[in-house]
């Protein structure tokens, strides 16, 4: 056989082709006439095209050995028999065309192994059986409506269309799939109502339709789908009550209905779900009391009832949930009464949030036993008395206990407990013994002295008290004209001398000021020359007041505002270590910021943005997230600063259409639309996260201006290759993504860093629609990632469901099915 080589040039560049010029080329058990078979070698693999030559016989199973083949076209021939299952071994195949033959039988399940397949063409044959059983097209950019034929595809066992841009009505576009096991339509733009007919999917174990625009009520008939294990309908527009029939789903281990518009009470029947491990009903309008029956769910590891209108007391039965580990969050309700002593039995709990309720009494001393607790928030209640002795209480920030009646303890900013206070424990209850007589005597003496002073000083005393009130509360917003505090700040900074400057941003210059009271604050002198009278508006007053009420451990506290004819000042708490950007730029300080601290910094930034986007009303879009707007306290805890300033400066004076942000962190879509969205903050977060891991700005991974419409080809290739490497070897991180000033991270930390890098690369994608939300990012960074203790826990927190559910943890750790490729069934 004579073989000649040619060099051809295509529109994509050169490729080497081998053209067979013999009379016949033997391939398996059939013969290819001369000049009809071309083997072309690409950079991505090989192509074999044998079409329109009327070949006969069976397709040889030995083709399955061509594992580097990227294209196989056997179309328009006379092949008979079945499709060889060995074709499923051709793992590099991107295009398979076997149309217009006489093939019979079903499409072999092994074709599902071709994860890189973009095109499958089988039309014009005599194939039988279920045409489609597993349709997995998640994590792409598909848009428009789903194929009409999908509704009638009764052979489907698994359907994944999550994280795309699909639109359409879920009732009209999807049918009843008798054998379906897994459905995930999350993170799309589907509308319509959940059909009661879906309860006829008797084999369905997982139904996820979160983050769409689904309306209507939750059909009670879903309680008939008794094999359901995972039900996630969160972040939609669902109304009505939670059907009590859901209590019949005895196999359910995850129920997530958060961030809808559900009302009514929580059904006590949910207490029948004995296998339930995660219950999230947060962010609705639920009222009534917390049902005692929830205490029967002894396998619960995650319970979130926050951001509702629940009232009554915390049922002591929650103390029976000794498996609670990830979270207990009942914040932002109207709960009252004392905190049950039984909650102290939750010794595995890591995160406890009881804030923003009307709880009273003392924090139980039994909380000393909660040794696993890493985060606690009891702010804005009516609590009093001493803090427990546990480590989490002594190390917690002041914000975790603010807004209470009379808490005391040994943390900075909290009133120390009186020395005369002795606490003894008898019969399981705290008894407080006070030396009352001297206190009463001293109190009476103080009253007498105060009355005498008032009578002596009269009106002068009243005037002095008013001035003293202004000094004590010098950062209250509108209780005074600001002249007093302005004078104090002006003197502390020597007329805003440059030597006191600690930072400069797009909205102004920041100075460190030590006030006459000894308090240290950070003062931002705003750039308001373009609109000197902007502080006079009512909108500005309301905005300042709202921003000053924001309390979060990862957000810099805004103490207040004062104005002068020459300057307008925002007064923030001062943080010792300064900005994250400045620290990373200092070699010595950067080495102090080890991998564990950096991971916590990134988590802190994510938590702050998630709080702004989803827990503030109205939501706050930062618009200028950068390493210079992240400050660090003495313990390297991250605090996001400059939040809301862009919106503040535009009140009554502009329409938020001017470009804001810091060069290198601005989302690319702001180049053609200047309307900021949450996804702009997501993009900036991704840049900052990579900067923290690399120790420098990741300019080579993003577009040169951070505001152009596309990556450069090299940047896109770099990001893609890094993502691919992280997916294949999650504990092996490319060195160009790590700060070389630190040693390579240990395996445990390396895994967390790999998760962060992968999330960051998702965040800096050009298309804002495919970026994750900050809520999703926070969920991925939660301690739940560490709960690989059992298959059931992994199912709850990281189930993506690419393979069969019987594969257990292995399938649940898979992050995507389709590797970003399209599958055409033609």
Image (tube, helix red, strand yellow):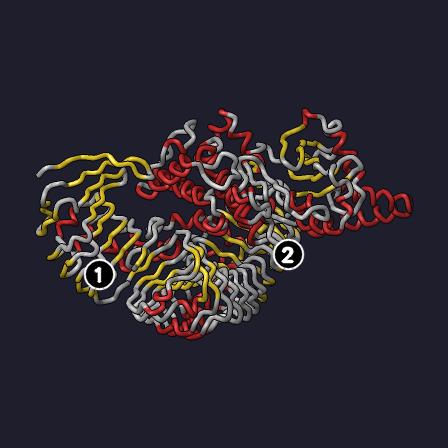
Q: Which one is nearer the viewer's eye here, 240 or 106?
A: 106
- Residue 573 pos. (x, y %): 65, 39
- Examine the rendering and report whether any part of residue 6 can be seen: yes
Give the residue drawn at x 14%, y 60%.
Answer: 80
- Residue 2 pos. (x, y %): 10, 37
Image position of 213 with respect to 788: above or below:
below
Between tags 2 and 1, which lies in front?
A: 1
The residue to which callout 2 is attached is: 382
The span from disc 2 to disc 1 (Cα, nearest Å) is 66 Å
Q: Which one is nearer the viewer's eye here, 724 or 249?
A: 724
Q: Earlier in the sequence, mark 2 or mark 1?
A: 1
- Residue 243 pos. (x, y %): 47, 72
Q: Which one is nearer the viewer's eye here, 241 or 2?
A: 2
> Tag 2: Cα neighbours inside 10 Å, few (<14), some, or many (≥20)?
many
Q: Is residue 495 left or right of residue 63?
A: right
Locate the C terminus and report the quarter of the image it occupies.
bottom left
Image position of 344 with respect to 245: above or below:
above
**Looking at the rendered structure, which numbered label has been put on residue 99?**
none
Image position of 274 with respect to 636: above or below:
below
> Tag 1: Cα neighbours inside 10 Å, few (<14), some, or many (≥20)?
many
Kind of element beneath mark 1: loop
Locate the N terminus and report the quarter of the image it occupies.
top left
Give the residue drawn at x 75%, y 28%.
Answer: 495
- Residue 142 pos. (x, y %): 41, 54
Give the residue drawn at x 32%, y 65%.
Answer: 181
The residue to which callout 1 is attached is: 107
Write down the quadrant of residue 363 in the picture.
Answer: bottom right
- Examine the rendering and report whether any part of residue 419 can be seen: no
Q: Which one is nearer the viewer's eye here, 417 or 226?
A: 226
Kind of element beneath mark 2: strand
Q: Is residue 80 left or right of residue 418?
A: left
Q: Is residue 724 left or right of residue 379?
A: left
């Amino acid at each position: 056989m004579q073989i000649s080589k040619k060099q051809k040039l295509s529109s994509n560049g050169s490729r080497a082709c081998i053209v067979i010029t013999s009379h016949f080329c033997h391939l398996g058990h059939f013969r290819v006439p001369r000049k009809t078979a071309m083997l072309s070698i690409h950079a991505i693999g090989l192509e074999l095209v044998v079409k329109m030559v009327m070949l006969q016989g069976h397709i040889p199973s030995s083709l399955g050995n061509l594992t580097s083949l990227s294209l196989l076209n056997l179309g328009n021939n006379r092949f008979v028999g079945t499709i060889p299952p060995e074709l499923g071994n051709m793992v590099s195949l991107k295009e398979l065309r076997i149309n217009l033959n006489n093939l019979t039988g079903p499409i072999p399940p092994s074709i599902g192994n071709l994860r890189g397949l973009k095109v499958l063409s089988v039309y014009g044959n005599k194939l039988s059986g279920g045409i489609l059983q597993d349709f997995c097209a998640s994590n792409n950019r598909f848009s428009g409506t789903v194929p009409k034929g999908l509704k009638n595809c009764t052979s489907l066992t698994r359907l994944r269309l999550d994280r795309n841009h699909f639109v359409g009505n879920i009732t009209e576009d999807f049918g009843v799939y008798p054998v379906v096991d897994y459905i995930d339509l999350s993170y799309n733009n589907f509308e319509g109502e959940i059909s009661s007919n879906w309860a006829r999917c008797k084999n369905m174990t997982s139904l996820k339709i979160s983050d769409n625009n689904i309306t209507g009520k939750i059909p009670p008939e879903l309680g008939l789908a008794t094999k359901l294990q995972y039900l996630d309908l969160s972040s939609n527009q669902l109304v009505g009550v939670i059907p009590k029939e859901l209590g019949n789903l005895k196999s359910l281990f995850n129920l997530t209905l958060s961030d809808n518009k559900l009302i009514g009470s929580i059904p006590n029947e949910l207490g029948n779900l004995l296998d339930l491990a995660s219950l999230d009903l947060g962010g609705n309008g639920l009222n009534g009391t917390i049902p005692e029956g929830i205490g029967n769910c002894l396998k619960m590891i995650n319970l979130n009832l926050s951001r509702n209108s629940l009232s009554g007391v915390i049922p002591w039965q929650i103390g029976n949930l000794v498996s609670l580990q990830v979270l207990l969050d009942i914040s932002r309700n109207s709960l009252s009464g004392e905190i049950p002593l039984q909650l102290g039995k939750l010794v595995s709990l890591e995160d406890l949030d009881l804030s923003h309720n009307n709880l009273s009494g003392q924090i139980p001393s039994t909380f000393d036993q909660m040794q696993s607790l890493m985060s606690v928030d009891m702010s804005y209640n009516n609590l009093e008395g001493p803090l427990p002795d546990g480590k989490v209480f002594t190390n917690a920030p002041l914000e975790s206990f603010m807004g209470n009646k009379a808490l005391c303890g040994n943390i900075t900013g909290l009133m120390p407990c009186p020395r005369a206070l002795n606490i003894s424990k008898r019969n399981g209850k705290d008894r407080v013994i006070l030396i009352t007589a001297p206190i009463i005597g001293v109190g009476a003496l103080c009253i007498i002295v105060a009355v005498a002073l008032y009578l002596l000083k009269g009106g002068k005393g009243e005037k002095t008290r008013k001035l003293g009130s202004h000094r004590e509360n010098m950062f209250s917003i509108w209780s005074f004209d600001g002249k007093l505090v302005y004078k104090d700040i002006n003197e502390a900074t020597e007329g805003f001398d440059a030597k006191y400057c600690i930072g400069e941003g797009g909205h102004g210059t920041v100075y460190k000021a030590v006030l006459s009271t000894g308090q240290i604050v950070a003062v931002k002198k705003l750039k308001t020359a373009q609109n000197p009278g902007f502080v006079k508006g009512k909108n500005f007053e309301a905005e300042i007041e709202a921003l000053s009420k924001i309390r979060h451990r990862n957000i810099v506290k805004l103490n207040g505002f004062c104005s002068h004819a020459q300057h307008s000042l925002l007064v923030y708490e001062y943080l010792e270590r300064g900005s994250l950007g400045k620290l990373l730029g200092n070699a010595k300080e950067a080495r102090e910021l080890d991998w564990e601290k950096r991971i916590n910094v990134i988590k802190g930034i994510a938590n702050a943005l998630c709080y702004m986007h989803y827990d503030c009303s109205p939501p706050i879009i930062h618009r200028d997230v950068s390493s210079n707007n992240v400050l660090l306290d003495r313990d390297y805890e991250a605090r996001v600063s400059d939040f809301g300033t862009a919106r503040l400066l535009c009140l009554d004076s502009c329409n938020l259409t001017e470009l804001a942000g810091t060069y290198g962190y601005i989302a690319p879509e702001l180049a053609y639309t200047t309307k900021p969205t949450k996804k702009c903050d997501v993009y900036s977060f991704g840049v900052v996260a990579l900067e923290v891991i690399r120790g420098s700005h990741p300019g080579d991974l993003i577009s040169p201006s951070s505001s152009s419409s596309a990556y450069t080809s090299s940047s896109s290739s770099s990001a893609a290759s890094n993502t691919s490497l992280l997916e294949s070897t999650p504990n092996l991180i490319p060195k160009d993504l790590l700060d070389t000033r630190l040693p390579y991270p240990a395996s445990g930390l390396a895994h967390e860093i790999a998760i962060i890098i992968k999330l960051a690369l998702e965040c800096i994608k050009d298309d804002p629609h495919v970026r994750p939300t900050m809520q999703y990012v926070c969920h991925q960074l939660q301690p739940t990632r560490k709960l690989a203790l059992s298959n059931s826990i992994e199912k709850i927190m990281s189930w993506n469901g690419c393979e069969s559910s019987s594969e257990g943890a292995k399938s649940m750790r898979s992050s995507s099915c389709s590797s970003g490729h399209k599958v055409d069934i033609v």
